[in-house]
Amino acid sequence: MGVGRILGRLALAGAGAVAAQGIQRALRASSLSKDLERTNFRGSTVNLAGGPALAVSAAVTSAAGAPTGRAATAALVAGLGSGAVGFYDDVVGVRPEHKAKGFRGHLGALREGRVTSGFVKIAGVGAAGLAASALLTRSRGRGAVTTVIDTALGAGVIAGAANLFNLLDLRPGRALKAGVLAGTPLAGGTTGGLVAGPLGAVAGSLPPDLAEETMLGDCGANALGAVLGTAYAARTGPVGRFAALAVLAGLTAASEKVSFTKVIERTPGLRELDAFGRMKADKPDIQVEKLPIDD
């Protein structure tokens, strides 16, 4: 990788960090700040400003670093689209009629004639993933059947990554740390510019998230996963996309049966990484009602 490309990606990372912090400050100082307050797992008051700040900064800087116009549009569609429906769920999902847990809960509510904000989020993330994948795949000039399969697999990766990061956003800094672990290997090569800005946005979002001042909510977690999923899909073909989708589907299925938090707390290495940097020690004896942002 040339010096110019390295400097360009470092500049994107810096822009992502500055943008994330600036948007957070603006939201927390605005008249919307009170409406964005929520209670986290510990019972502390946190602000959802971290979500829109990360969604916008990650999507825009990912697009700025994209190698092609189609890839840039895909990053914007995936990041902003997933973030928008996630924000809708964050805001509307607190209403009693929208409460449901997991895919099964939202689909069960639909069978009862109720369209929950969570179902809107699921459909919206899926649509954003499909549109972004189509933009990436169309430029490869393959046959019709291969294009359809490749597009479907890419959409699954993007939507699956968005959902997985949402499942991880149950403790301060967890989803953001996962973003660093997943995004860093994608930072090289011609498509690496797609993750340079988002990694910077993650770095800018970490301090207030770890301090339990802000949190990502569905908006930020979905957007981060979707942008990273787009970056992965941009550099892989059907085989790579299928492998990633299999892993994502397995983890999502496991989440319906097993608590990721309990697994992490019982696993040396993961437990220490998960707790690293937090300003407050976890107190598992404190129980609060699970919020829609924890679904």
Image: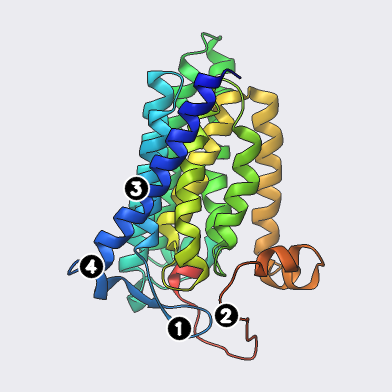
Left or right: residue 38 versus residue 249 is: left
User: Which circle's residue, 2 or 1, is located before the other in the chain?
Assistant: 1
Q: Quadrant of the N terminus?
A: top right
Left or right: residue 35 versus residue 169 is: left
Q: Position of residue 78 (x, y in %)?
A: 42, 39
Looking at the image, is mark 1 or mark 3 nearer the viewer? 3
Q: Position of residue 274 (x, y in %)?
A: 67, 65
Looking at the image, is mark 2 or mark 1 nearer the viewer? 2
Which amino acid does the dot numbered 4 rest on? Ala
Q: Residues within 10 Å of mark 4 (few under 14, many from 20)?
A: few
Numbered disc 3: secondary structure: helix
Which amino acid does the dot numbered 2 rest on? Lys
Q: Residues within 10 Å of mark 1 (few under 14, many from 20)?
A: few
Q: Residue at x 45, y 75 (%)?
A: 291
- Tag 2 residue: 280
Q: Residue at x 38, y 41 (%)?
A: 15
Residue 19, numbered circle: 3
Give me the C-alpha separation between circle 2 and circle 3: 26 Å
Give me the C-alpha separation between circle 3 and circle 4: 15 Å
Q: Nearer the viewer, residue 113 or 30?
A: 30
Rendering quarter of residue 218:
bottom left
Q: Nearer the viewer, residue 234 or 210?
A: 210
Q: Position of residue 125 (x, y in %)?
A: 43, 46
Q: Position of residue 50 (x, y in %)?
A: 39, 61
Residue contact between numbered discs 4 and 2, judged by CB atoms under 8 Å: no
Rendering quarter of residue 132:
top left
**Relative to residue 29, is residue 203 depicted above or below?**
above
Residue contact between numbered discs 3 and 4, judged by CB atoms under 8 Å: no
Regarding residue 91, the answer to whether it shows in the image is yes
Residue contact between numbered discs 2 and 1, judged by CB atoms under 8 Å: yes
- Tag 4 residue: 29
Regarding residue 127, the answer to whether it shows in the image is no
